[in-house]
Image (cartoon, grey):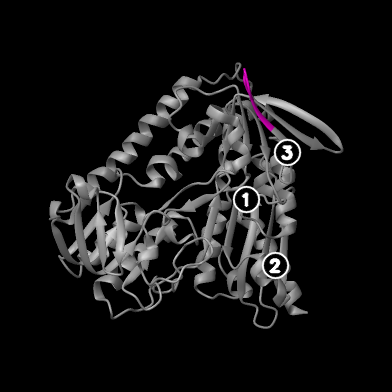
Amino acid sequence: MNPIHTVDVAILGAGTAGMAAYRAAAAVTDRVVLIEADRYGTTCARVGCMPSKLLIAAADAAHAAQQAPGFGVNVSEVSVDGRRVMDRVRAERDRFVGFVEETVTSFPEHHRLLGRARFVDDHTLAVGDPSDGGCVVDARAIVIATGSRPRVFPFLEAAGDRLLVNDNVFDWTDLPASVAVFGPGVIGLELGQALHRLGVRVRMFGVGGFVGPLSDPEIRDEARRVIDAEVPLDPDARVTHVERVADGVRITWEENGTSRDETFDYVLATTGRTPNVDRLELENTTLVRDRRGVPVYDPTTLQCGTTGIFIAGDANADVPLLHEAADEGRIAGDNAARFPAVLPGLRRSPLSVVFTDPNIAMVGETWAQVKDRNPVIGRVSFEDQGRSRVMRQNRGRLNVYADRATGRFLGAEMIAPRAEHIGHLLAWAHQQNLTIDQMLGMPFYHPVIEEGLRTALRDASTQLAR
């Protein structure tokens, strides 16, 4: 007979959300188990945030050297050693993963369980292979924090063994000569621009006109113009054929009524991610699921219906960002430990950043969320912004949205120099429910890029005063 573990809380997945859930639950009860199906190491550390930023850092170094003559600084020929670039990416990636592994293995051994979990009912899990030492976990509450995996459109499978997802990139031992990137979302834009700056021939293809997560048509058009000026980008490409050929993958597409084709070493699919809930046998539970198979849940408590099941992080297919996963895990773990006493947790103002150059950032409510309320829009272009011109980074636009009746800051979208920092200032203002005039009462130093933000706020204030 398979052993039975009886606990208060079982957590599925030892990623960012799962570890946060574990810490929150373990602060309330010692009867908790963290179940991991594969290997320790978060998506962020292993194939996401950190290795991508390592690649981007190398790309930015190469780009800065290439741009030096624009300042009157002459440098010798800039060359990129692909093997050394990837050596550092992999070494530092492994270091970050090692820190995560050390953290998880520091949890008490009786709190950890390795094996794939499947639901038997709302409170029972089968873990591992029943014929080879599997076990049963009986839990008063369960947190699903199983993360997500790359999604690949079927037509790209014609690329065969030259089809990659972002997970594969960080295991390269050298840089390829050419890559076709499908999907100019967050991952596609970051990797596409970085590879281009490292000397890889890159072309990016999209569907539907989307550029990153942007919803504001003015900012989206600017982002397309800025990125396309450096890396060929068609966000609404008409690809007619993908074929594995002897020397790579041939892509055929229509451009301005003309058929074009190029051959690339690899196709990189960055076409979104799929939540890892389809292998949990959720059909054995009472959960209501949406068309994607994801349990319907309350975003303030992370509770699925009225059950003792909670879902956090990428598994709920809402906001696939590390800081959101950590917050959701904490809320879900605490509520699971205290179930049935469930309370709303702190959800911070939305903030997302794409680490292209210029950065893309979105704060608070998006244009798509506010447009029907006729908001005031404060605008600024960074083409003539003082500090941006000094640094030869004068590209991009910023739109801020304000409530027409109260003057309260609602949100912003931008592609701008150092937007990762502007985004944080705006997120803090949004969470404090500040008005545009209150924000203008804050200090702005000179000369800094943030003066561009002040210009947009002044534009909004002028309109509000009317």
- The quadrant holding residue 303 is bottom left
Q: Which residue is under mark 2?
A: 458
- The quadrant holding residue 335 is bottom left
Considering the numbered disc 3 on the image, is that residue within a helix, a strand or a loop?
strand
Considering the numbered disc 2 on the image, is that residue within a helix, a strand or a loop?
helix
- The quadrant holding residue 266 is top right
Q: Which residue is under mark 3?
A: 239
Q: Hey, what amino acid is under mark 3? A: Val
Q: CA distance from mark 2 to mark 3?
A: 44 Å
Q: Residues within 10 Å of mark 3 (few under 14, many from 20)?
A: some
Q: Is residue 414 above or below residue 178?
A: below
Image coordinates for residue 347, horizontal then vertical, percent: 44, 70
Q: CA distance from mark 3 to mark 1?
A: 19 Å
Magenta-colored segment: predominant secondary structure: strand
Which residue is rendered at x = 28% and y = 42% of the image? 99
Front label number (2 vs 3):
3
Image coordinates for residue 65, horizontal then vertical, percent: 59, 27
Q: Residues within 10 Å of mark 2 (few under 14, many from 20)?
A: some
The answer to whether residue 375 is left or right of residue 328 is right
The answer to whether residue 107 shows anywhere in this view is yes
Q: Hey, what amino acid is under mark 2? A: Arg
Which residue is rendered at x = 40% and y = 64% of the image? 283
Q: Hey, what amino acid is under mark 1? A: Gly
Q: Which residue is under mark 1?
A: 212
Q: Which mark sits nearer the N-terminus, 3 or 1? A: 1
Residue 159 among those drawn in magenta: no
Residue stretch rendered in magenta on the structure: 242-248
Residue toward you, 195 or 304: 304
The answer to whether residue 64 shows anywhere in this view is no
